[in-house]
Amino acid sequence: MLTVAGVTALSPVAPMGMGTAQAHEFNAESNITINKQGSRFFGKVASSRGKCKKNRNVTLVKKKRNGTRRVVGRDTTNRNGNWSIRTRKKGRFQAVVSARSRRYGHNHVCRGDRSATIRKKRRG
């Protein structure tokens, strides 16, 4: 409540000097890369905010000709944003990092991303 000149009113804003915490939101882009070596797919999640690199969920999906996608593996990034998934499947693959939102009295949003599509060919 705020009393000014004998009038009492409810105020959503605290008077100066009251030290209220202000809600704010951090939005950070995330970028994911994909590479392959043998049966191992690997890459990195990069972001301007360190909290958006580590402990991110990465999914490796196989893209089918009819447009559908099938999950072939999952990993969580390390503190540097690195991930690695093994599969013996052949085809076209893409890595996906899901968006993440954390609340610490304010909101941290790490946006999701999809990598380029790479192809793993059959030998022979």
Image (cartoon, helix red, strand yellow):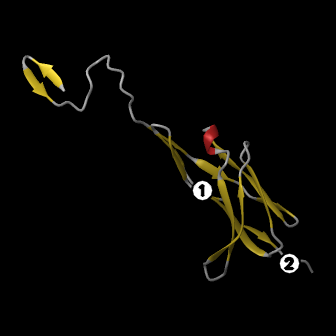
- The residue beneath circle 2 is 122
Residue type indicated by callout 2: Arg
Query: Which residue is at 42% across, 36% downward?
Result: 24
Q: Position of residue 8 (x, y in %)?
A: 11, 25
Q: Relative to 91, does residue 46 appear above or below in the rendering?
A: above
- 93 on left or right of 49: right
Q: Is residue 49 above or below residue 6?
A: below
Q: Position of residue 91 (x, y in %)?
A: 76, 75
Would residue 105 be seen by someone viewing this image from the given angle? yes
Where's residue 58, x and y in %? Answer: 67, 58
Q: Quadrant of residue 80?
A: top right
| Rendered image quadrant of residue 124 | bottom right
**Residue in the picture at 85% in, 67% down:** 39
Residue 10 versus residue 52: which sits nearer the camera? 10
In the visual, does 75 lie left or right of 28? right
Q: At numbered mark 1, what does the secondary structure look like: helix, strand or loop?
A: strand
Amino acid at the residue labelled 1: Asp
Corner quadrant of residue 86? bottom right
